[in-house]
Amino acid sequence: MTDDLATLDATAQAELVRRGEATPTELVEAAIARAEATQPRLNALTTERYDRGREEAASAALPAGPFCGVPFLFKDLTCGYEGEPWHDGMRALKDADFRAPHTTALAQRFRNAGLVTIARTNTPELGIMPTTEPLAYGPTRNPWDPTRTPGGSSGGSAAAVAAGIVPFAHASDGGGSIRIPASCCGLVGLKTSRGRISVSPSGEIARPLSVQFALTRSVRDCAALLDAVAGPEPGDAVVAPIPTRPYRDEVGADPGRLRIGLCTTVPATGKPVAPDCVAATEHAGRLLEAAGHHVEPAHPDVLAERDITGAFLAMWNGMAASNLARAGRLIGRELTADDVEPLTWYLAERGREETAVTLMDAQFAMQTATRRLAKWWEVDGWDLLLTPTLGELPPELGVLQTPNDPLAGFARGASFVPYTPFFNVTGQPAINVPVGTSASGMPIGIHLVAAWGREDLLLRVAAQLEATAPWADRRPAVHA
């Protein structure tokens, strides 16, 4: 059964349980077998939860949610169960055997949906880099080409889903960390609107860049899982508009004739990105035109301005400093440079140098840029922005993670991810759709961005592309 299940999305696996053709225990045992078979080659997982997952699958108390019995994975960052390992990609937390002090709201919602979590997935330290090569756990390898990065920071989740271990997995996105690995590994990756899914007990004010959701193989899984976990918690500072109908109803729905701006250059320089990425994006543009949409070269002018990048970096540095201070409090001692990776310490040092005025100015610049960007959608009459997800194909491992010269890899990352961080600043939803393939066989994603709160539109258009350029039958070199 395990070979057959490796090719089914979560919707199909849940249907097997509902029809009595498989039990949750059978689904979970098959997923554990696939995890054990692929882990030596991919290193996608950090801590196992196999025995607990088996207990939950066999329990009469397993919630009868829409994905009852479907196996799942947690990214080892920002999401966890009380009393279970939680390391954020950090050696200090790993060495201290740190355990989650609480069950997060999203973790509980995944559980309520009937999902059975069997392990946690690898992530770069504190989710900082767009590659998954932490010193704490070693590099995760891309199933399509194990010499290359699976992206980051949700690279472990992406590798596991692409390799068929589970049909979908938890992910988070503070600068592209859902969309980047989705492109690298040939998956659907939706970064939701700020306030669409509660990040409780964290907060949208202190951590405005990051959202949490999942990486999926199919658009219908993406929509159905969003139905299961979206919504606010008491005290949330930002709440996205309530959808008019279930997101699963958007899959296959007619989006109407949309006005779509196409951008294949780096906004700040006007230079094109890698030819394969341009070709995939232009191909997607032609597919959308054939579906009846109007596509023309256009993008918001504010994307070319430095203020938005400067604001992002100020917040990124400040969060690094804050996260190290928080981690130190969690294990009862102040962290030093010996406890963390060189880049993490460098960014935290820059963050500690920032003043309250610097951070307030960064937040002001973020809000100003957000208003100006929103005008392109809400006033100028555009429905979607279409760009490449990445500026190049996934680099080889070791290109972006450079401990001996940490700024070299960090700077290199800017050309790798020239589009995704903008929309963490604005809080808009954006989705990676894996419509392209390079000459060497690597998947290439395209990036669609909608106005705040319009996940419904992204899902309709992503489903159109899935119907016209299906990817479900593609298999990476390493597959369960």
Image: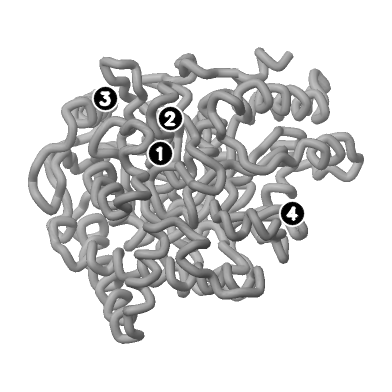
Q: Alpha-carbon neighbours of circle 4 within 10 Å: few (<14), some, or many (≥20)?
A: some
Which residue position holds label 2?
Answer: 185
Name the residue carrying label 3.
287
Say if residue 237 shows up in the picture: yes
Which-is-in-front pick, marks 2 and 3?
A: 2
Residue kind at label 2, given as amino acid type? Cys
Q: Which element is circle 2 on? A: helix
Q: Which residue is mark 4?
A: 84
- Residue ID at (29%, 70%): 366
Q: CB of mark 3 within 8 Å of CB of mark 4?
A: no
Q: Which mark is residue 151?
A: 1
Say which of marks 2 and 1 sits in front: 1
Instruction: Give the residue type at disc 3.
Output: Leu
Q: SS of the residue at dot 1?
A: loop
Q: Are marks 2 and 1 in contact (CB under 8 Å)?
A: yes
Of label 4 and label 2, which has the lower sequence position? 4
- The tag earlier along the polypeptide, 1 or 3, is 1
Going by the picture, which residue comes out furthest to the right?
60
